[in-house]
Every structure is written in structure tokens, then in C-alpha cells.
Image: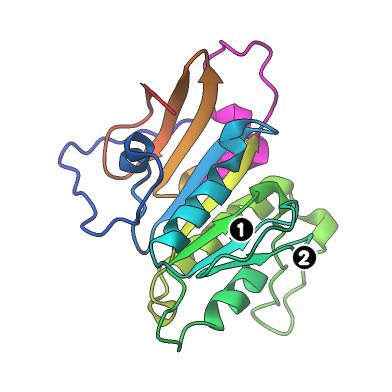
């Protein structure tokens, strides 16, 4: 699976949320209405990028929701709400986002750690005689794609003030840490390629982070770069 960008005149988002890593932040395009995917190896320093981003945004006054069931209890942080549900769906995320929609400071950033915890809710039939798909009959790839679509719809929902949504995803183990990252390392989370505005994979090598930009609505993709972190 590969995503190509053929356009050469890419526009840049005018409003960008603060990022703790200037170089990476320029690649992520953390803007309202955007769905961003970040792939990182389990238990790596990069796998904590979602928490780091949520903490940084909250410290800069952005109302932030972090869905992270594995996050240990820590001291409360102003503007940051941590949800530790073991299972998530786009509907449960939307419910929490909607609870802030009419407040003076609605949610500006949603971070989900991680995509593999997400499970879509099987929709009701459009007509009474339509059969309802049994969850066991729905292919996992279809479920993952449906989850990505729903999250993108949530990000662009003006009723909720178009929150930026960042989804972390776990990479499958690399046979060799020096092997180049490819989209297949995301497993089912590779379905995010269709609905994300930006999709990047991170891999730490000696002293640097290799960044595979699998999708970028605002620049060429796929491409690779190296950043300091």
C-alpha cells in the first residue's frame, strides 16, 4: 500500500498548535480539523510522543483530551484531561469532546494512545430490511478504515470547533533497527493512510530519529528525513 501526492502547489495551514519538537512539529501540521497519525515502536521513547504533545499543548493553554489507558497516575495538569478507558470507539471519543463544545475553552487537541485500542461500533441498518453485519463478519481492515473515517469526521466537525486529532499507533517489531520503515509496519493501522492529513513513522537510530512520511497533504509523500530528538 502506498500513497502518492501528485500536486506540487501545496498550501500550508495557517494555524498550528504548539509542538515540543520544532522539526517534527513542522512535519505533523498540527492544525484544527486535521487527523494526524504517528507510528512508533512499543516501549520506545517515541511511543511517548502522544503524551509529550498533550502535555505541551495543555501547558500552552490548549484544552486537551488524552485517551491513554496505560498511562500511570500522575499529578493533574491544567487543561489536560486523561481518560483511561480500556476500549475506545469513535463514539466514545466524540462523547467526551462534545461535553466541552459549549464551554469557553472547547477541546483543541485530542490524543489517542493508541490506535490498536480502537474498535468501531457496527452501524444500524439504513433500512429496516437491511441485514446488520455481524461484527465477526466484518473484516478487521474494514473496521480500521471505518475508525479512521469517523475520526476524520470528528476532527472536521464545526460543532466541536474542529479539534486536532492525533492518533498514536504501534509499529510491528523491526527485524533490524536499521531497516527502513515502510507502511506495512503499521499493520492494520496502515488503513489510516486514507483519512489522515499527515501520517509519519518514527524509528530511533544512533543519535537521530528516522522519519518516514507516508502521507502529507501539504507536501511530497512518501518521503524520508532525519531529525534530532
- Expressed as whole percent of the image width and height from the top left, the position of residue 1 reads 52, 31
In the visual, does 180 lie left or right of 188? left
For the residues carrying marks 2 and 1, which lies nearer the camera in this image? 1
Q: Nearer the viewer, residue 151 or 62?
A: 62
Question: Is 101 situated above or below 170?
Answer: below
Residue 127 lies in what quarter of the image? Answer: bottom right
In the visual, does 205 lie left or right of 3? right
Seen as rendered, the residue at the extreme bottom is 102
Q: Residue at x 77, y 61 (%)?
A: 87
**Element marked by disc 2:** loop
What is the crowding at mark 2: few (fewer than 14 residues within 10 Å), some, or many (at least 20)? few
Seen as rendered, the residue at the extreme left is 9
Residue identified by numbered label 1 = 147
Instruction: Measure the C-alpha gap from mark 2 to mark 1.
Output: 16 Å
In the visual, does 69 lie left or right of 95? right
- Residue 59: mark in rendering: none
Q: Nearer the viewer, residue 175 or 133?
A: 175
- Expressed as whole percent of the image width and height from the top left, the position of residue 144 reads 64, 51
Q: How many marks?
A: 2
Magenta stretch containing residue 21, yes or no?
A: no
Question: Start and end of the magenta stretch?
Answer: 171-192
Residue 1 can be seen in this image:
no
Residue identified by numbered label 2 = 133
What is the crowding at mark 1: few (fewer than 14 residues within 10 Å), some, or many (at least 20)? many
Amino acid at each position: 500500500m502506498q500513497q502518492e501526492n501528485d500536486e506540487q502547489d501545496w498550501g500550508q495551514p495557517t494555524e498550528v498548535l504548539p509542538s515540543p519538537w520544532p522539526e517534527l512539529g513542522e512535519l505533523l501540521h498540527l492544525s484544527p480539523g486535521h487527523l494526524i497519525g504517528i507510528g512508533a515502536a512499543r516501549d520506545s521513547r517515541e511511543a511517548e510522543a502522544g503524551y509529550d504533545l498533550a502535555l505541551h499543548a495543555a501547558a500552552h493553554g490548549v484544552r486537551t483530551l488524552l485517551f491513554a489507558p496505560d498511562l500511570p497516575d500522575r499529578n493533574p495538569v491544567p487543561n489536560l484531561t486523561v481518560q483511561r478507558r480500556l476500549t475506545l470507539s469513535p463514539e466514545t471519543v466524540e462523547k467526551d469532546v462534545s461535553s466541552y463544545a459549549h464551554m469557553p475553552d472547547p477541546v483543541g487537541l485530542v490524543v489517542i494512545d493508541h490506535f490498536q485500542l480502537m474498535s468501531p461500533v457496527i452501524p444500524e441498518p439504513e433500512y429496516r430490511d437491511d441485514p446488520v453485519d455481524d461484527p465477526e463478519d466484518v473484516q478487521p481492515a474494514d473496521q480500521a478504515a471505518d475508525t479512521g473515517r469517523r475520526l476524520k469526521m470528528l476532527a472536521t466537525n464545526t460543532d466541536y470547533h474542529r479539534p486536532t486529532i492525533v492518533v498514536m499507533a504501534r509499529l510491528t517489531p523491526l527485524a533490524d533497527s536499521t531497516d527502513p520503515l515502510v507502511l506495512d509496519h503499521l499493520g492494520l493501522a496502515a488503513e489510516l493512510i486514507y483519512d489522515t492529513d499527515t501520517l509519519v513513522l518514527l524509528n530511533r537510530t544512533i543519535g537521530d530519529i528516522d522519519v518516514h512520511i507516508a502521507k502529507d497533504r501539504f507536501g511530497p509523500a512518501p518521503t524520508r528525513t532525519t531529525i534530532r530528538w
